[in-house]
Image: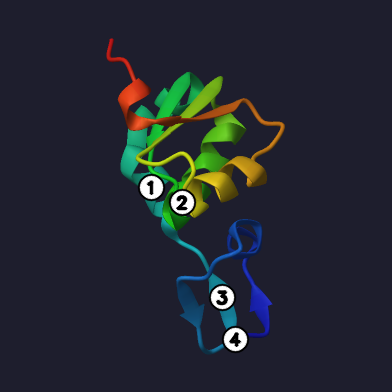
């Protein structure tokens, strides 16, 4: 690759390559936001994200740009993914908690 799109650079991941210009793109968040459609305003409040894997990490970054608070529920808060996410988002208004600590409305 000779270049990265702003999204690929920001998220540190590429899932699509434009071979003609050797540019890497990441379409995960774009697809997620597009799927919300008119409900995108839901990201302005309190957001609960399930999981801390690669795609969840990108969604967490995007949610933090828009939301009031972010809670990430994971099976194992000590897992490599959860610890990495916590470190990457240090200083942001985010909680990483075990799935069992999530209370319903």
Q: Mark 4 or mark 1, which has the lower sequence index?
A: 4
- Disc tally is 4
Could you classify mark 3 by the number of other residues whose Cα lies within 10 Å: few (under 14), some (14-19), or many (20 or more)?
many
Q: Which residue is tagged 2?
A: 29
Q: Residue at x 51, y 53 (%)?
A: 80
Check the image and name the residue furthest to the right. Answer: 91
Residue name at image x 65 percent, y 44 percent = 87
> Residue placed farthest to the left in the image?
104
Please tell me which residue is depicted at 54% across the width and 22% down the height of the picture.
69
Nearest the camera: 35 or 13?
13
Left or right of 97: which side holds 4? right
Tell me which numbered mark, 2 or 4, is placed earlier along the sequence.
4
Q: Of helix, strand and loop, which one carries label 4? A: loop
Residue 90 percent across, percent down from the top left = 69, 37
4 or 1: mark nearer the eye: 1
Badge 3 or badge 1: first in the primary sequence: 3
The answer to whether mark 3 and mark 1 are in CB contact below 8 A is no
The residue tagged 1 is 32
Q: Does 18 sit above or below residue 72?
A: below
- Mark 2 and mark 3 lie on one chain; the one further toward the N terminus is 3
Structural distance between the alpha carbons of marks 2 and 3: 15 Å
Please give the residue where the numbered disc 4 appears in the rendered image.
Answer: 21
Image depth: mark 2 or mark 4 in front = 2
- What is the spatial separation of the Cα atoms under label 2 and label 4, in whole angstroms? 22 Å
Q: Nearer the viewer, mark 3 or mark 4?
A: 3
Quadrant housing residue 74: top left
Labels 2 & 1 near each other (Cβ < 8 A): yes
Q: Which residue is mark 3?
A: 24
Q: Percent position (x, y) of residue 22?
A: 59, 86
């Amino acid at each position: 690759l000779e270049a990265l799109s702003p999204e690929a650079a920001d998220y540190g991941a590429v899932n699509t390559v434009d071979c003609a210009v050797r540019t890497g793109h990441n379409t995960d968040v774009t697809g997620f936001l597009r799927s919300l459609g008119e409900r995108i305003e839901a990201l302005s409040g309190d957001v609960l994200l399930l999981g801390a894997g690669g795609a969840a990490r990108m969604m967490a970054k995007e949610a933090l740009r828009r939301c009031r608070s972010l809670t990430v529920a994971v099976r194992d808060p000590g897992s490599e993914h959860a610890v990495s996410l916590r470190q990457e988002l240090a200083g942001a208004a985010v909680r990483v908690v075990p799935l069992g600590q999530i209370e319903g409305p």
